Image (cartoon, rainbow, N blue to C red):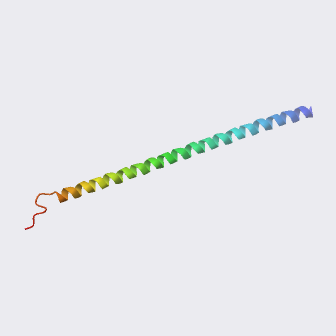
């Protein structure tokens, strides 16, 4: 009877260990997924910022050209 109880206890311990290992692996997978999502979001925000900067540069260049091309700009009184 003690042998059976020991065998059942050992089997239960192995099942619990397997469950704990599976939960640990699942946690690591979730952590990796979260990290990849955050990196992708950060890259996206960086790209948006660079695009905004390019737009502002283009607008500034266009405004500068408009200022230089105003009628009568070169004429001095």
Q: In the figure, residue 23 lies in which quadrant?
A: top right
- Given residues 6 and 56, the one toward you in this image is 56
The quarter holding residue 36 reads top right
Q: Residue at x 60, y 42 (%)?
A: 30
Left of 77 or right of it: where is 56?
right
Q: What residue lies at 9% left-to-right and 67% top-to-bottom?
A: 76
Residue sitting at x 16%, y 57%: 69
Tell me the quarter of the picture where residue 27 sits: top right
Q: Residue furthest bottom?
A: 77
41 on left or right of 77: right
Q: Residue sitting at 26 percent across and 56 percent down?
A: 61
Percent x, y of residue 19: 72, 37
- Vertical comparison of 20 with 50: above or below: above
Decide which of 28, 1 is in the foreground and name it.
28
Task: Please indicate whether residue 8 sits to the left or right of residue 51 in the image.
Answer: right
Q: Is residue 4 left or right of residue 69?
A: right
Q: Quadrant of the N terminus?
A: top right
Q: Position of residue 8 (x, y in %)?
A: 84, 33
Counting the numbered discs, the total is 0
Q: Quadrant of the C terminus?
A: bottom left
Hey, which residue is sitting farthest left in the picture?
A: 77
């Amino acid at each position: 009877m003690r042998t059976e109880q020991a065998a059942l206890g050992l089997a239960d311990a192995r099942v619990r260990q397997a469950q704990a290992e599976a939960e640990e692996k699942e946690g690591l997978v979730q952590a990796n997924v979260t990290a990849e999502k955050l990196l992708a979001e950060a890259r996206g925000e960086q790209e948006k910022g660079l695009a905004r900067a390019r737009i502002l540069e283009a607008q500034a260049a266009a405004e500068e050209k408009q200022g230089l091309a105003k009628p009568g700009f070169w004429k001095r009184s």
